[in-house]
């Protein structure tokens, strides 16, 4: 059954490895519930269940993190994405996901040389005035080396690991199929949206594999940051940049993790916190394109209280409509308007989950109302966003992936600001910008532009409406009107009916063999076997073997139902 479901025998070895890791880390019951263990064993792949209970004493969040680390870069990246899904997972899981790091031992440079030579069009020692073969940093997808251009510019060269794209593509194929099986066979996983999470992971990894895409993101954000001269984005050297390698200016300063050096370099922590917050808020609220992972490792503090952002492999995008909704949410939180917050969150979460919307709205209003009268400086905007997503999680509601990523960026940013300046308050920085953007949204020129766009869309729909109605009626008259119905669950019913029919047919064959053999036993003469009529003996033997098979099939089916009902 699994081979038909997964449909790719080439991935069976990797699937066997994945399930083996899950079993070793205490997820054997989930593997059995999905029917994967029995199917793989029937396909000739033995799963080792020994020592699976050794990890039973470890907490499930830790078990899951250890399993993801062992499974490699694709699954580590999945865990890093899940670290931003506080709307789906509790704080104990989020804390473990945040411990996931994709740092791995660096590859010897000679293994990278043939690919790098092909991408650069020559030996790196020739293309660059100086090239360091010892890596500056290494991760699961790429590693970084320092170099110097012939004009004396210090640069960093990011090189994708050879063959990593094939490994990730194979893992994604399996994860997509496993997510579909999990969502169909385990309804309890449906609120976690496994297939949507895998699609989100695939998009993120595809962008990270294209190192030129990272550079395009950097240039777009650099153009948006032109109004803030204290924000620096590394310059891209396109002559040496492609999908598998990129070259950018090397930023020399104080790493975001080394806060102790700020005072020695004469940098002002308070100014740095304010400028960093203003930059990221501008990216999110005004530009709609933002650095989605602004943690200390991606920030470098430069002389003159300037800030350099690096590594734009993960960026977030917000449509204009989404930004309008975000403005309403943030203004509702900052100015303590519970009804505004409730309305926005209910629109985001949707109302098709069978949730008690009245109860949810009451909880959100009570949460926001508790801050009524509190001084603005005492509001922790990141924590407020985290608490709101916890309320949604309690109702088994998930946020759209772009918003979950945004909220994670907000929480990370506020944590960085407080690390620089204990008196830093995101709300104090956000409120002036939010009000400014709101004023800009309602300027006569902007309102006139929106009205014109709405009118154009309305006229376009009205223009196409007669043709659409004519096409619909023509198809209806010809009997070509199609209605789409989701029959995913009916397929399972069909499979069960098919198995029941096969067993019924087998039972009839067994009964016929018993009756026929009984008749043959009464006939005198003919060949004998063990002193009995040969054909009668063979008939009874066949009936006996068929009966054993039927009893075993019924027992396995009943056992599967018992496991699924636990």
Image: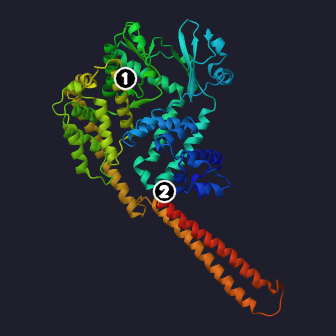
Residue 322, image quadrant: top left
| Residue 183 image point, x, y percent | 46, 52
Residue 114, image quadrant: top right
Front of the two marks 2 and 1: 1
* Disc 2 to disc 1, C-alpha distance: 42 Å
Q: Is residue 11 left or right of residue 448?
A: right
Above or below: residue 154 compared with residue 43: above
Above or below: residue 121 compared with residue 453: above
Name the residue nearer the viewer: 460 or 509: 509
| Residue 10 image point, x, y percent | 65, 47
Which residue is identified by label 2? 185
Q: Is residue 450 left or right of residue 292?
A: left
The reply to whether residue 440 is in sight is no
Q: Residues within 10 Å of mark 1 (few under 14, many from 20)?
A: many
Q: Residue at x 48, y 13 (%)?
A: 251
Name the residue nearer the viewer: 542 or 479: 542
């Amino acid at each position: 059954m699994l081979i038909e479901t997964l449909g790719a025998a080439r991935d069976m070895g990797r699937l066997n490895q994945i399930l083996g890791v899950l079993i070793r880390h205490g997820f054997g019951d989930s593997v059995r519930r999905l029917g994967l263990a029995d199917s793989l064993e029937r396909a000739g792949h033995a799963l080792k269940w020994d020592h699976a209970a050794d990890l039973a004493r470890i907490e499930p969040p830790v078990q899951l993190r250890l399993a993801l680390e062992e499974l490699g870069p694709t699954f580590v990246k999945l865990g890093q994405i899940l670290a931003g899904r506080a709307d789906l997972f509790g704080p104990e899981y989020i804390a473990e996901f945040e411990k996931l790091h994709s740092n791995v031992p660096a590859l010897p440079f000679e293994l990278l040389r043939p690919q790098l030579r092909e991408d650069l069009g020559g030996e790196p020692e020739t293309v660059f005035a100086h090239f360091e073969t010892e890596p500056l940093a290494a991760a699961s997808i790429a590693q970084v080396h320092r170099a110097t251009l012939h004009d004396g510019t210090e640069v960093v060269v990011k090189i994708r690991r050879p063959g990593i794209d094939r490994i990730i593509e194979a893992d994604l194929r399996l994860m997509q199929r496993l997510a579909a099986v999990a969502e169909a066979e385990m309804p309890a996983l449906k609120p976690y949206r496994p297939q949507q999470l895998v699609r989100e992971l695939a998009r993120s990894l595809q962008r990270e594999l294209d190192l030129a895409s990272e550079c395009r993101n950097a240039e777009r954000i650099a153009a948006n940051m032109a109004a803030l001269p204290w924000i620096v984005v590394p310059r891209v050297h396109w002559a040496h940049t492609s999908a598998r390698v990129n070259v950018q200016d090397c930023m020399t300063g104080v790493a975001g993790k080394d806060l102790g050096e700020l005072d020695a370099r004469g940098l002002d922590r308070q100014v740095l916190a304010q400028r960093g917050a203003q930059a990221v808020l501008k990216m999110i609220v005004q530009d709609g394109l933002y650095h989605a992972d602004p943690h200390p490792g991606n920030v470098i503090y430069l002389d003159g209280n300037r800030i350099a952002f690096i590594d734009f492999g993960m960026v977030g995008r917000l449509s204009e409509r989404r930004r309008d909704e975000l403005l309403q949410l943030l203004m509702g939180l900052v100015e303590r308007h519970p009804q505004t917050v409730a309305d926005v969150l209910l629109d985001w979460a949707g109302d098709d989950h069978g949730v008690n919307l009245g109860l949810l709205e009451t909880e959100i209003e009570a949460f926001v109302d508790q801050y009524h009268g509190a001084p603005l400086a005492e509001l922790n905007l990141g924590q407020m966003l985290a608490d709101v997503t916890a309320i949604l999680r309690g109702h088994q509601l998930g946020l759209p992936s772009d918003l979950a990523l945004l909220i994670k960026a907000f929480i990370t940013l506020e944590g960085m600001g407080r690390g620089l300046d204990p008196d830093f308050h995101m709300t104090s920085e956000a409120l002036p910008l939010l009000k400014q953007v709101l004023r800009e949204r309602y300027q006569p020129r902007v309102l006139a532009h929106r009205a014109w766009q709405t009118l154009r869309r309305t006229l376009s729909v009205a223009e196409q409406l007669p043709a659409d109605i004519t096409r619909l009626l023509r198809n209806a008259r010809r009997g070509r009107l199609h209605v789409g119905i989701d029959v995913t669950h009916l397929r399972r019913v069909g499979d069960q009916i098919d198995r029941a029919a096969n067993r019924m047919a087998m039972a009839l064959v067994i009964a016929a063999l018993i009756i026929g053999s009984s008749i043959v036993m009464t006939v005198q003469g003919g060949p004998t076997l063990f002193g009995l009529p040969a054909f009668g003996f063979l008939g009874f033997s066949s009936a006996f073997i068929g009966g054993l098979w039927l009893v075993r099939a019924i027992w396995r089916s009943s056992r599967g139902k018992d496991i699924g009902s636990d």
